[in-house]
Image: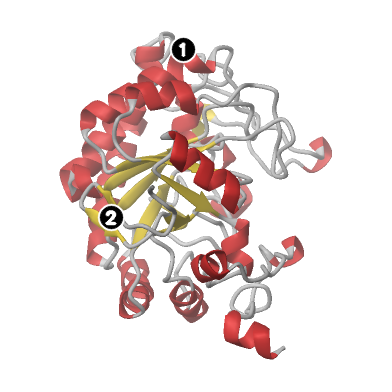
Amino acid sequence: MTTLFDPITLGDIEAPNRILMAPLTRTRATPEHVPTELMIEYYRQRASAGLILSEATGISAQGLGWPSAPGLWSEEQVEAWKPVTAAVHEAGGLIVAQLWHMGRLARPDVNGLQPVSSSVSRAPYHDPDKNPYGEARAATLDDIRQTLDDYATASRNALRAGFDGVQVHSANGYFIDQFIRDGVNKRDDEYGGTPENRIRLMREVMERVIAEVGAGRTSIRLSPNGESQGADDSDPANVFVPAAKALNDLGIGFLELREIAENGTFGSTDVPKLSPQIREVFKRPLVLNQDYTLEAAQADLDSGLADAVSWGRLFIANPDLPERFRTGAALNEPNPKTFYIPGPVGYIDYPALPDAKAA
């Protein structure tokens, strides 16, 4: 029987176990989006993950409008990522860069630019009177061509910075997701309307990334069920199942799905999960994410639904999560109040097992 502690081949990446670290925005970069020394220790501590999926990392100034999130478009950023990836490798780990274009969620107060999206729209915010998101303009064909070039450049930079591959962030209501979902995409050109047109940008981005790093070192994250940051779809199976089939045909290393449930702890929905339908058309490694216990993860491996599972918040609080799972040790509780603050607190000060036992 396959277990979470068994190795897995993810395209060209040989992961030592199936307990992956999910991408996690942590805002410890500089205001200029350059990685910091704190990030070296943070990622080094978590190198026992089968594979680390880095925090969302901007491909351009246009696409990154979040305070103190890192980028991969400048030489300074590339050089600052090098000691991060080196630390992970020296600790025996693997790490891929998650590439990010925020679309209409890129805040003008951060990058000083009007956001772009599939169509003219403004993302919602929990307090409408303090909404930091600007009204996005519809991306022109030139904008799309520039974005494809930016993904290619960031992919090359990821390899130069020492990453083992690239994951494209196509989930959670960001730029590519804004093209996929008909709740946001109101275009009437070749990037709008039919499901085939709405997944066109995703496919073209993946083709450009594959050309730079190879299909076996390319992956993608989707969030196929339920609303996310104002982005929704009237018939998600109609667009996300064909998207998964297209990704399978491209030969990518793996597909990660963030799926929320009715009783989810980080978003909830009554829209059914699409992983069973996606599993039918995506025959390559499938990684599932969101609210998994160790037992539920093993059950989805046993059924063949998943090949690996990624954890986010538990990896924040437990840098040695695979060992805690293996030994049945108690888990540290994550503190959401320190997820996005600057500095080491709630970032590199969660105890590993020896320290936890001593305490």
Asked if residue 140 shows in the view, the reply is no
Amino acid type, residue under disc 1 in the picture = Asn
Left or right: where 159 falls relative to 222: left
Question: Quick one: 148 or 215, which is closer to the camera?
Answer: 215
What count of labels does the image hold?
2
- Who comes first in sequence, dot 2 or dot 1? 2
In the figure, is residue 141 to the left or right of 137? left
Q: Nearer the viewer, residue 336 or 59?
A: 336
Q: Position of residue 289 (x, y in %)?
A: 53, 44
* Depicted 2 relative to depicted 189: above or below: below
**Looking at the rendered structure, which numbered label has been put on residue 196?**
none
Q: Which residue is mark 1?
A: 238
Residue 28 picture location, percent across and down: 56, 69
14 on left or right of 139: left
| Residue 243 found in image quarter | top left
Secondary structure at badge 1 equals: helix
Tag 2: residue type? Gly
At a point 57% along the width and 35% down the height, the residue shown is 259
Label 2: which residue? 165
Tell me: residue 289, above or below residue 270.
Answer: below
Q: Secondary structure at mark 2?
A: loop
- Using the numbered discs, state the Cα–Cα distance from disc 2 to disc 1 in whole angstroms: 29 Å
State the image quarter where residue 339 is shown.
bottom right
In the rendered structure, the answer to whether residue 25 lies left or right of residue 156 reads right
Work out whether residue 210 or residue 60 is closer to the camera in this orientation and state it. Answer: 210
Q: How packed is label 1: few (under 14 Cα within 10 Å), some, or many (20 or more)?
A: few
Does residue 16 appear in this view? yes
Residue lying at 42% horizontally and 14% vertically, measured from the top left: 192
